[in-house]
Image (tube, grey):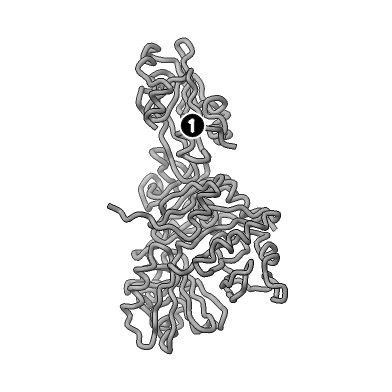
Amino acid sequence: MAPAPRRTPLYDWHVELGARMVDFAGWEMPVYYVGINEEHRAVRARAGLFDVSHMGQIEVTGSGAEGLLKKALASDVTRLEEGQAQYSFLLNEKGGIVDDLIVYRLPDRWLLVVNAGNTEADFAHLKALKHRGATLANVSDATAMIALQGPVALELLADIWPKKAAAPDTLKPFTAIARDVAGVPCLVARTGYTGEPGVEIMCAAERAGDLWDGILARREHGVVPSGLGARDTLRLEMGYPLHGHDIDAKTTPIEAGLGRFVHLDGREFVGSAVVAKQVAKGVKRRLVGLRLVDRAIPREGYAILADGSPVGKITSGTLSPSIDRGIGLGYVPANLATPGTVLQVDVRGRVRDADVVPLPFYKKES
Amino acid sequence: MAAAESYPADLRYHKDHDWVRVDGDEAVFGITWHAQDALGEVVYFEPPAVNSHIDADGSYGSLESVKAVSDVIAPLGGTVTAVNDAVVETPETVNEDPYGDGWLIRVRLDDPSAVEGLLDAAAYQALL
């Protein structure tokens, strides 16, 4: 029997708001409150508030902390100054993606924010590297995390921000600072998974409700509680991969088109030999964005066809609320990965034309 | 806005959460409040072709929400005489009015008396 799903500190808040709850990576999470499309559009137009407390936090401290992360991560953490962050990967020896994550260099510690379902595996992976002088702590259970995302997110945040502190919009993307938000001590990071401006805010689990309520008290900005359903359609419109679907231990960052986040520069880290070889010699398959010509929806597992023959599978797909077209990600042979290539997707027995398009699928009109 | 939960007494029901409104030798098919609620916001309806024949208990099309695909099951067999283009154009009509404007297809029944084998509202609700 599967273990009972876990609940975040905000579970009662979701139920109170009438959320539809689903099991996601072993957690009972809100998939939507009112509707996925409505929440998606609110985030693109105004702001959405997401409980992402299921995500994992691993702290690394000690004199060997930087040494461990240099060995374990595909990005070069020595490039980070205090308060800066990088998108990065834990790779296995074959270059496969154990997890994708954000690494923060904070004044007194390093912090890794990792995928919920991978937290324990990541911790074990780091521990197995047996780096001297590095201390690992899985602080996930003690930590709540809320994402506030959308064009008015920073404006809203300014209302619940210490008066004397520099305004939230002075925070640069991929930086983080310790700040009180709505009176709750937090780590505020200018990061997100939606393509909109915004923050991801971490605080002690027992203060999560105060932070959540403090933000929703500013409803005049048009902020709405948003579920994992909208989080998924928002990230997919941006072409951001989801671990366990679009990337996993059998795919590499190069195959996934994420090579720009890997800093080789002659460095040695777990998986670097395979990744360096792939950069030099190329890869056989690549992750591409597919946009369906008809109004049909590609979904995970559907076959991708070229001239009627299967060449790959959809790894994530949805109807894009912003462009009102079926969009999906999937791996295809490298010679078919060029934008402009016309492929097909087998949508439950009906073959639908799909264009290989550059990512992101959605760009804000400027 | 989503409709409030209801199971009208003048309809007959199939256990796979479909309803039938019989009108002489023709009938209108749709999905129940429970089915649209489980699916969430409907974003796509793939209807059968007009004049195609559909079998009782067989799938005649699909409804998709952002997260899921669901086959729609024919409570009775017959020939499709009309498809609700309003739902093709505005699929969320199924959520807003599942027994009214959110009907899916109209069918000329092979055997109108077969409706007697379907569930009434009370029997269907007992399954939920």
Q: Residue at x 64, y 55 (%)?
A: A223
- The image position of residue A249, as x and y in percent, is 35, 65
Tell me: A226 left or right of B63: right
Residue A132 image position (x, y, % from top left): 35, 87
Image point (43%, 86%), residue name:
A62
**Near-viewer residue (A273 or A34):** A34
- Element carrying mark 1: helix
Q: Quadrant of residue A142?
A: bottom left
Number of marks in picture: 1
The residue depicted at 49 percent of the width and 46 percent of the height is: A20
Tell me if residue A114 comes above or below residue A25 in the rendering: below
Eyeballing the image, is B107 above or below B33? above
Relative placement, left or right, of A194 versus A217 is left
Image location (x, y in percent) of residue B82: 51, 21
Letter of the chain that mark 1 sits on in the rendering:
B
Q: Is residue A39 left or right of residue A120?
A: right
Picture layout, residue B71 above or below residue A239: above
Q: Residue furthest left?
A: A1
Q: Where does the image place residue A272, in percent across and percent down from the top left?
A: 38, 77
Please state if A10 lies on the left or on the right of A27 as rendered: right
Residue bearing the label numbered 1? B33
* Residue A217: quarter of image: bottom right
| Category of crowding for the residue at label 1, using alpha-carbon neighbours closer than 10 angstroms: few (below 14), some (14–19), many (at least 20) | many
Which amino acid, by three-letter code, is at mark 1?
Trp
